[in-house]
Amino acid sequence: MVRVTGNFQSESPLDPKAFEVLHAAFESGWANPGKLSQSGARAHQLRNQALESIAASLGVAKDSILPFSSLSMGYFLGIQGICDRSSTLIHGATDRKDVFAIAATMDHEILPSDLHGKILAPKAQSPTSVLALHVANAETGVIQDCAEIVGRVNSDRVFLDATTSGIRKPISCEYSTAIFDSRSWYGPADIGFLVVNKAAQWHNPFPHLNAAKVNFDAPLPLIIASAVAIENFSSRVTEARIQAQVFNAQLRQAFSQIPNVDIAGSLDSTLEHMLSASFMNCNGEELLRGIQNDGFSVDSGSACTADDLEPSHVLAAMGILTHGNIRITLHPDTTQSEVDGLISSVKSNVDRLRS
């Protein structure tokens, strides 16, 4: 087995302190915060403290946050919760597949993307429509001009997908609901947070007997670990962004010297820790395997998946190469030697596949 010496995959490592908290929580067990007991009261207090910490880091009110246990659920809660039967959902061509799945169940309109990954929104849409918009793209890291798009679409019901941007990119527009992924700040997987910014516009879209009771949640250990992780990352997010920008610039400079390459977005229009590059005349799966054999783990947006056997819809919507793609994620513990080694690996494997 090849030893991985450099992790550049989007699956981010869990914050060490969050791991300690999570391990201790599952070892000792936690009471149900909803139970009327001494242990239940303590669990309820811990839950409130954790949500207060997360809310402070996100810059929202604690009572506006609702934890959930899967991203698909988060998209459903955030979008369907502000829709009614007559709503038309407007969303971008580069959104996650979860948004497309919801749009397929209702009237919808898809906004195209330009070559740089920016969503093109026409003026004067119906104010009764619902706009779904990602702050930054999950594959390319391209940052959207949210305030401008919201203004052009002219809808007062806006869902924001902040699962990729997290606390790296502050929200710059009015919105009704937003979702965040704990992994974006190196928290545990399988937990996210719905922010209901405009409570009057949101309803619980799940079937329920008591409209006043929210019938979804996430395990308490995951909520506490998420709070620990976001506190730690908040203290170093500026430093992490600066370092990632330096490494990202080096990668872009090196890859741009390789003939026939498409790099998604510019350095100043994407999240600093993400990079997507596609190399002509290279099979994405073979390129990925060659880089892995050199000890570096990366993702690919062009490799066909076992589920749908289709290339990246994001790259296709942008009109750039959909084959020979690699996606690189820079983490706070990424080193200069790892970046240098990855550059060397990509260059040698592209040359090998083209020869």
Image (cartoon, rainbow, N blue to C red):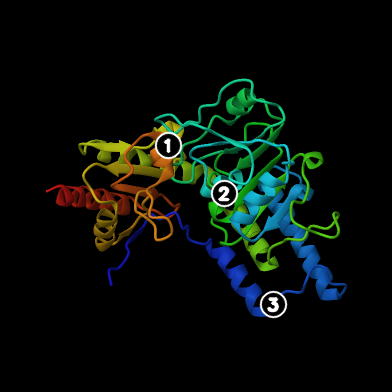
Task: State which mark lies toward you, 2 or 3.
Answer: 2
The residue to which callout 1 is attached is: 317
Say which of 94 and 308 sits in front. Answer: 308
Disc with the residue nearer the chain's start (1 vs 3): 3
The part of the image, by quadrant, that contains residue 250 is top left
Q: From what the image shows, is residue 243 above or below residue 147?
A: below
The residue to which callout 3 is attached is: 29
Say which of 355 and 109 sits in front. Answer: 109
In the shown orientation, is residue 312 left or right of residue 226? left
Residue at 69% across, 50% down = 77
Task: Give the numbered dot on residue 101.
Answer: 2
Q: Quadrant of the N terminus?
A: bottom left
Disc 1 marks a residue whose amino acid type is: Ala
Secondary structure beneath dot 3 equals: loop
* Cβ–Cβ under 8 Å for marks 2 and 1: no
Where does the image place residue 332, in percent across and percent down from the top left? Answer: 45, 52
Where does the image place residue 29, in percent across and percent down from the top left? Answer: 69, 77
Disc with the residue nearer the chain's start (2 vs 1): 2
Disc 3 marks a residue whose amino acid type is: Gly
